[in-house]
């Protein structure tokens, strides 16, 4: 049984700016909407009505996503903001913050993304996302925590460049 690891930090909503949509992300979404609308118009000009319905439906889903995603990210930033304490153990993670308190076993983690500035932990149903900034962990212990998180979460652990 490994020694529990406790991490404490303070997250300000402004520090969670990487959750908010970036300009290139919006441009990409608009591009996909345009492609689907164009494909739908081309399919509608042919006698292929089901394909036209599919392409227009996909364009509509992208538009809904473009409207909803910023609101979801803002709500997540507000939920995670404030003074936070996380304890990692062999059993799982205990997350205690100003607006949330949750105990999550390792089996419930869908993804543990190791990004350059933070770890992003995402759970299965019920879906939740937790952020752990690497700056909250002393430099001497980061490598050790990285190894232990990879061991505890197993195949869910992924290293990401962005």
Image: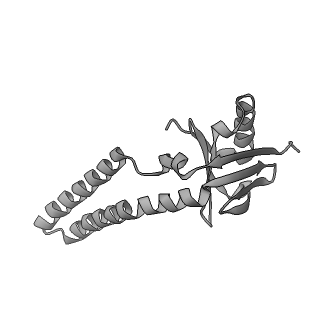
Vertical side of 126 occupied by 5: above or below? above
In the picture, measured across the screen, residue 42 lies left or right of residue 50, that is left
Residue 128 lies, in percent from the top left, at: 60, 60
**Which residue appears at 54% of the width and 46% of the height?**
15
Residue 97 rendering spot, x and y as whole percentages: 69, 57
Relative depth, front residue between 13 and 115:
13
Residue at the limit of the structure toward the right, as seen here: 1
Towards the viewer: 149 or 36: 149
Q: Is residue 117 above or below residue 66?
A: above
Give the tally of numbered discs. Answer: 0
Q: Is residue 89 left or right of residue 59?
A: right
Residue visible at 42% across and 60% down? 69
Dividing the picture into quadrants, the one containing residue 56 is bottom left
Q: How is the image coloured?
A: one colour
Residue found farthest to the top: 140
Q: Residue furthest left?
A: 45
Quick check: can you spot residue 46? Answer: no
Q: Is residue 74 above or below residue 136?
A: below
**139 with respect to 24 (left or right):** right
Q: Quadrant of the N terminus?
A: top right
Q: Mark yes or no: residue 32 visible.
A: yes
**In the image, is 90 to the left or to the right of 46?**
right
Horizontal and vertical percent for residue 83?
A: 68, 53
Q: Residue at x 10, y 65 (%)?
A: 45
Residue 77 position in % (x across, y down): 54, 56
Snapshot quadrant of residue 100: bottom right
């Amino acid at each position: 049984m490994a020694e529990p690891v406790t991490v404490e930090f303070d997250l300000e909503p402004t520090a969670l700016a990487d959750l908010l949509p970036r300009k290139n992300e919006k441009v990409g979404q608009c591009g996909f909407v345009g492609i689907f609308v164009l494909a739908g118009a081309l399919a509608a000009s042919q006698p292929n009505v089901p394909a036209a319905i599919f392409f227009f439906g996909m364009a509509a889903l992208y538009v809904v996503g473009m409207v909803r995603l910023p609101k979801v990210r803002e709500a997540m930033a507000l939920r995670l903001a404030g003074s936070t304490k996380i304890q990692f153990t062999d059993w799982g993670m205990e997350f205690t913050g100003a607006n949330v308190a949750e105990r999550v076993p390792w089996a419930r983690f869908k993804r543990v993304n190791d990004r350059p500035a933070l770890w992003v932990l995402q759970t299965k149903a019920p879906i939740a996302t937790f952020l752990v900034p690497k700056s909250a962990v002393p430099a001497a212990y980061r490598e050790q925590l990285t190894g232990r998180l990879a061991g505890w979460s197993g195949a869910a652990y992924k290293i990401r460049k962005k």
